[in-house]
Amino acid sequence: MDGETGLLFPVGNAPALAQAMARLISDKDLANRLGVAGQEQVKRDFRQEQIWQALHREYLEVLRRKESRRSSILPQLEN
């Protein structure tokens, strides 16, 4: 949300970007609050263990889909 962990502005709007940057340069307290809040959000929402677990699940899913396609393409062996 705007003003909590950063300042939002429309994509491609250079004057709005310049205004946000000027605001951070002139308001050191705001810049510090946003920086601390952003660091806390990263620590909370992007813990390394969570990232590795999510990546592991994605790899397993890719392998499962690949194996599923392979078994549907290859002829089935009969006993």
Image: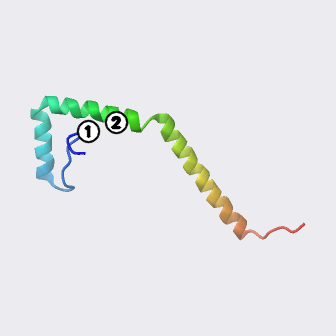
- Residue at x 54%, y 41% (from the top left corner): 53
SS category of the residue bearing label 2: helix
**Residue 77 point in image, percent of width and height:** 84, 67
- Residue at x 14%, y 52% (from the top left corner): 14
Q: Which residue is mark 2?
A: 41
Q: Name the amino acid type tagged 1.
A: Thr
Task: From this view, report whether residue 79 is shown above or below residue 38.
Answer: below
Q: Quadrant location of residue 2?
A: top left
- Residue at x 39%, y 34% (from the top left corner): 44
SS category of the residue bearing label 1: loop
**Residue 73 point in image, percent of width and height:** 70, 70
Graded by Cα atoms within 10 Å as few (under 14), some (14 to 19) or many (20 or more), the crowding at tag 1 reads some
Q: Nearer the viewer, residue 34 or 62?
A: 34
The answer to whether marks 1 and 2 mark residues whose Cβ atoms lie closer than 8 Å is yes
Left or right, 79 with respect to 28, comes to right
Q: Which residue is mark 1?
A: 5
Left or right, 57 with respect to 47, comes to right
Graded by Cα atoms within 10 Å as few (under 14), some (14 to 19) or many (20 or more), the crowding at tag 2 reads few
Q: Nearer the viewer, residue 61 or 22?
A: 61
Q: Nearer the viewer, residue 12 or 55?
A: 55
- Residue 46: mark in rendering: none
- Residue at x 90%, y 66% (from the top left corner): 79
**Residue 78 point in image, percent of width and height:** 87, 69
In the picture, which quadrant includes the N terminus? top left
What distance separates the C-alpha of mark 1 from that of mark 2? 8 Å
Q: Name the amino acid type tagged 2.
A: Gln
